[in-house]
Image (cartoon, grey):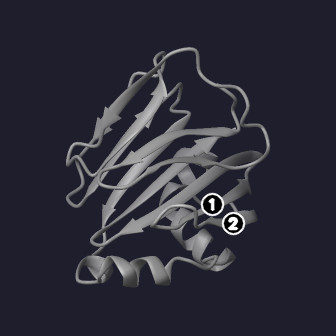
Amino acid sequence: MSPNRLPAILCAGAAAAVLAAGAALAQAPDASVKVSEPNNRFVIEVPAQWPPDFDTRNPGRTAILVGVDPECQFHTINDDSSAAATPDAVRSSWSKPIGTEKWIAALNPFRGPLFGDANTTLAVRDETVDTGGYFPIQRAVAEGNGKTVTAAVFVRPGFVVYGLCRS
């Protein structure tokens, strides 16, 4: 699997979406497996050689860690601010780029595990929004402490999913 490619995510009740950034998307994994988030809100498809590790210790949060050290992390976080929103309202509010400040705030909880230093300064580039499916997918590349992370985030009423892969 190309280090610049995020595994595929299949959202329950939504069209399949591949969370990716950059142009290096041509290389596909030889064999893959589908892994369901414990609350069955989404399914990820990862290379077969990346056995998943689930972390459900924090109430309202689920993490699926895959790869070596782990290469990629998928976090589902309950979102009270969108829980009462209609799907159309969530879609509308996420259809424009969220901006660098919001990306940095979103990545703050993951600085230590992904960048090796919880206090590292992050730079965000290549922000895009994929509006090809019903719900938009925000994408960006973040750099800090000599490491690069391809990130994607999408919101559904009541929860947010983060897909984060080091390259």
Three-letter residue code for mark 2: Thr
Seen at 20% across and 58% down, the residue is 59
Seen at 58% across and 67% down, the residue is 131
- Which residue corresponds to mark 2? 128
Residue 56 relative to residue 152: left or right? left
For the residue labelled by badge 2, is the local secondary structure a helix, a strand or a loop? strand
Q: Residues within 10 Å of mark 1 (few under 14, many from 20)?
A: many
Residue 139, labelled with which disc? 1
Point out the tag, 1 or 2, that comes first from the N-terminus.
Answer: 2
Seen at 46% across and 63% down, the residue is 154
Q: Who is closer to the viewer here, 143 or 91?
A: 91
Percent of width and height locating residue 84: 23, 83
Tell me the quadrant of the picture where the N terminus can be found: top right
Residue 80 relative to residue 25: left or right? left
Contact between labelled residues 2 and 1, with CB atoms less than 8 Å apart: yes
| Distance between the alpha carbons at the discs numbered 1 and 2 | 5 Å
